[in-house]
Structures are given as C-alpha cells and as structure tokens.
Amino acid sequence: MIHTRECPIETVINVLGGKWKPMIYWHLIESTKRFSDLERLIPAVSQKMLTQHLRDLEKEGLIVRTIHPVVPPKVEYALSDYGKTLIPVLEVMCAWGENHNERKSEESAS
Amino acid sequence: MIHTRECPIETVINVLGGKWKPMIYWHLIESTKRFSDLERLIPAVSQKMLTQHLRDLEKEGLIVRTIHPVVPPKVEYALSDYGKTLIPVLEVMCAWGENHNERKSEESAS
DNA sequence: CTGGATCCGATGGGATACTG
DNA sequence: CAGTATCCCATCGGATCCAG
C-alpha cells in the first residue's frame, strides 16, 4: 500500500489543531483528569467539543481513556507514554509563541 | 491596555495553521521565491489561498514581500530575520510528525 | 457523571472569472 | 506576472436536548 504521507508539520497541526486540544493536552501534562475536571479547568469549552477532542487525541494514541465501572460513572484521561513524547515539542512551540505574543504586544503599544 | 493573551501553543497553530502555510514557509526556508515559483512548487494550492496565506504570514512579520517595479510585475517573498527564528521550532515539530506518521503506517500494516 | 444526537451559524478553502 | 472578486461547499464549533 502506498502512503501519500502528509507534511510532518501538518501532522502536528492536525494532532493539536482543534480549538481546545492544546489546552486539554496542557492540563493532562500535569496529571490525570476526569471529564468534569477538564470542564471545570476549561470553562469555555462545550461538552460536545471536549468529548470530540478527547476522542481525537485518544485515536492518535496520545491519551488513554480509563472507564471505572462504578456508579456514578468515572472516566479518567491521562497522557500515554507515547503522548508524553509530545511534551518537548510543546515546550519549544510554547517558548516561541510566548515570544511572539510579547512582540505583538510591544508593537501595538508603540 | 489589557491583553488577554492566548495560549502560546495556539499562537503557533494560528501562525502555521492554514492548509498550505507550512509548505509555503518550508519552501521559503530554502530561498527567496516569486509568487509563480510557489505556485509551481505547490501545484495543488489555489491562487486565492496562496495570496491569502502569504498576506497572513506577512502580517505576522514572518516573511517580507518585495515588489520590484518592473514590467511584467515581479514580487518576491523571503523569510524575515524574525521569521527565521521559527526554523528550529519547525524542525522539532517536523521530527515528531515524521515519527508519528511512521507509527501510523506500521499500525495500519499490522 | 459522562456522554450521544441534532440543529445551526461561522469560518475555511476551492473554482472560476476578471484586471493592472 | 501577480493578484482581486465572487460564489459555493465542507468542515468546525456552539447550543440544546436526551440518555445510561
């Protein structure tokens, strides 16, 4: 089978490109979170998008979804070992992004 | 003035998030390019999106647009000094993206 | 608590035609 | 050569309602 492999940079953008994916991922770096935790930590996200983005990240193998068979339902999301390999990438992106925001602030203040 | 500063990772995604922006940027790393060069190098991109993405990248200060007042028109696009600071970020993203694509290829081959 | 289903507006991007 | 203008469709994301 022939893979018309996409540009690797686009790959990263596809993986993190959803509106809330970076923030979801960011919170999971700190620790495992429940669905309701993420809702609380990211108040502006809708249930629909939170669910959808979590499914996307899971499908890419970056996070692990654990269902505890209890009542009421308890579902936890955590970075997979593989997902953790993205952390250094995030840090580099983050550093540049912060600098870029600084730059735009100064420019609008001039 | 208060800046509600966006997540730095989202900043990077906003800057590179257009469908063709990574590829445009990638080609400009190698050397200055004319509009028609980019059209030739990225055959699938429409004139509209190429123009729009180039304007976006210019607005962010990453590339410089130079108009040579000659007939026929000649316009060149080049990375700005500031734009070059993104190169290391791109390389990190690219490395991870390649690995991720590999991983998905293997998984679909199993 | 953790979703799924549905509807709807906003945005992104493609196709085509036209212009200095 | 290097665009601009217009129309159109697909996808994204928000709001709301429903369910195990």
Image (cartoon, coloured by chain):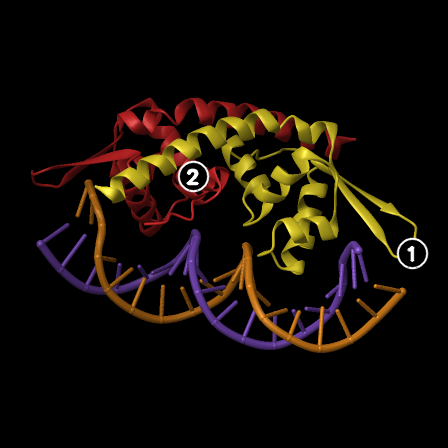
Chain colours: A red, B yellow, C orange, D purple
**What percent of the width, then of the height, locates residue A18?**
43, 45
**What percent of the width, then of the height, locates residue C19?**
84, 70
Figure check: B44 above or below A63: below
Horizontal arrangement in the rendering, residue B4 relative to residue A90 (left or right): right
Q: Mark 2 lies on which chain?
A: A
For the residues marked 2 and 1, what is the alpha-carbon distance in whole angstroms?
44 Å
Horizontal arrangement in the rendering, residue B104 relative to residue C20 (left or right): left
At mark 2, the secondary structure is helix
Q: How many discs mark residues in the rendered view?
A: 2
Question: Residue drawn at (29%, 24%), measured in percent from left and top?
Answer: A31
Q: Nearer the viewer, residue B4 or B64?
A: B64
Question: Residue drawn at (29%, 47%), measured in percent from left and top?
Answer: A51
Looking at the picture, which amino acid does disc 2 mark? Leu
At mark 1, the secondary structure is loop
Q: Which residue lies most toward the front here?
A: A1
Q: In which quarter of the image is residue B46?
A: bottom right
Looking at the picture, which amino acid does disc 1 mark? Val
Q: Quadrant of the C terminus of chain B?
A: top left
Q: Nearer the viewer, residue A93 or B67?
A: B67
Q: Nearer the viewer, residue A43 or A22?
A: A22
Q: How crowded is mark 1: few (under 14 residues within 10 Å), some or many (20 or more)?
A: few
Figure check: C16 above or below A13: below
Horizontal arrangement in the rendering, residue C1 relative to residue B55 (left or right): left
Figure check: C16 above or below A104: below
Residue occupied by mark 2: A16
Q: Which mark lies nearer to you, 2 or 1?
A: 1
Residue occupied by mark 1: B71
Question: Residue drawn at (45%, 45%), measured in percent from left and top?
Answer: A6
Q: Which chain carries label 1?
A: B
Q: Quadrant of residue B79?
A: top right
